[in-house]
Amino acid sequence: MTQPLIGVTTYLDPAAWGVWRMPAALLPAVYPALIQRAGGLAAMLPPDAPAAAEAVVARLDGLVIAGGADVEPVRYGADADPRTGPPARERDAWELALIQAALSSGTPLLGVCRGMQLLNVALGGTLIQHLDDHTGGEGVYTAHTVKPVPGTRYASLVGETAEVPSYHHQAVDRLAAPLTASAYAEDGTVEAVELAGAWALGVQWHPEMGDDLRVMRALVEASQRGTHHPRRGMTGAARHRG
């Protein structure tokens, strides 16, 4: 059986290795490792011209929008809170274009943390710019429980309340109209979203930091089906905001 090719987006940041100090396309190794453990082949997607997104997605069987920097508030019509981090404009533009291309082509899509937030923004939603108590401190993950909403795709994958690894200070505020919230934290934070009529799921936590393969395995299985059957586009599913 052919393993599906899953693209995963990367940072573009200064880095150091050996004697070298220069900009680099970066991705924590746990992301491709999770894809591989779930049965897929991983391909890194560094920021590129948004116009290239359609051609890139056409070569993929599935797409993961990885975690990372805060989405620039101008993308959802807000002024920046002082606690919002510096913008990653190349990533914002590239990943919004990838999301639009994936939704338009019917390519299975998983958004992780920032990726879930960006999916919400891409479809017209907004974000809370700062939350307390969703990290374990600077650079330290915390764990909390999320409860699935019955009848959702996420609930069909993970039917019970589950403990998940978390590190974020932003979250969904106004949910985009096409999306459904499919899991919540105990404090009411939206922890998963999904799009009806498509395999498009976002999770606020970091599955790559844990041992639960169910969400990533579901993406890989959906992408596996796509390697044997023509994809069906979702006309008008996404509207790229800028």
Image (cartoon, helix red, strand yellow):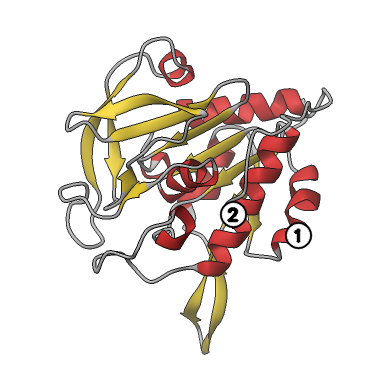
Q: Position of residue 60 (x, y in %)?
A: 74, 42
Q: Earlier in the sequence, mark 1 or mark 2?
A: 1
Residue 130 found in image quarter: bottom left
Q: Position of residue 108 (x, y in %)?
A: 64, 32
Q: Which residue is mark 1?
A: 51
| Amino acid identity at mark 1 | Ala
Q: Residue furthest top?
A: 151
Q: Which residue is drawn at the image coordinates 57% and 52% (left, top)?
A: 241
Quadrant containing the N terminus is top right
Residue appearing at x 48%, y 57% in the figure: 75
Residue 212 seen by the camera: no
Give the SS element for disc 1.
helix
Q: Residues within 10 Å of mark 1 (few under 14, many from 20)?
A: few
Q: Does 21 sit above or below residue 172?
A: below
Residue at x 76%, y 51% (from the top left corner): 56
Pick the front one: 28 or 200: 200
> 39 or 164: nearer the eye?
164
In the rendered structure, the answer to whether residue 151 lies left or right of residue 91 reads: left
Q: Is residue 38 left or right of residue 106?
A: left
